Image: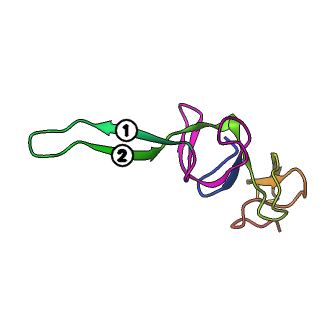
Amino acid sequence: MKIKLNDQVTIIAGKEKGKKGKIMKILHKKEAVVVEKINIRTKHIKKKENKPGERIKFEAPVHVSNVMLICPNCNKNARVGYKILTTGKKQRICKKCKEAVDRRQQSP
């Protein structure tokens, strides 16, 4: 997956199309991501002996194909590519502005 935790993304398909948020969780086996304040669902919890019933709101996963990374440099939706550094490590780059997406690893 070309998207990592804490990346800013835009939803590009579905009922939440156009909304923006931060990646909170990545589900690799399902190829899905949980985006902050996007795809809110309600779960109804049945009452128990000593607990009343309740409704819990939570963020449901969104398939990774329905989100697009927002480049931190150009602030546009962009596809992600890779560049091999001289150290041999891979670095994510924005296909529009050709700048590094990860701020931690700057190219030498």
Crowding near pointer 2: few (<14 within 10 Å), some, many (20+)? few
The answer to whether mark 2 and mark 1 are in CB contact below 8 A is yes
Say whether residue 32 is magenta: yes
Apparent side of residue 68 relative to residue 45 in the rendered image (left or right): right
Residue at point 44%, 46% (across, down): 58
- In this figure, which residue is indicated by the disc labeled 2? 56
Estimate the x, y position of residue 86 in percent, counting from the top left: 82, 59
Estimate the x, y position of residue 62 in percent, counting from the top left: 59, 38
Residues at marks 2 and 1, CA–CA distance in whole angstroms: 5 Å
Task: Give the SS element for disc 1.
Answer: strand
Find residue 43 and name its label: 1
Q: Quadrant of residue 89?
A: bottom right
Residue at point 68%, 67% (across, down): 104
Q: Amino acid at mark 1?
A: Lys
Residue at point 82%, 65% (across, down): 73
Quadrant holding the N terminus: top right
Find residue 6 and name its label: none
Residues in magenta, as a range:
11-38
Quadrant holding the C terminus: bottom right
Apparent side of residue 44 relative to residue 97 in the rendered image (left or right): left
Q: Quadrant of residue 49?
A: top left
Task: Give the SS element for disc 2.
Answer: strand
Apparent side of residue 53 relative to residue 18 in the rendered image (left or right): left
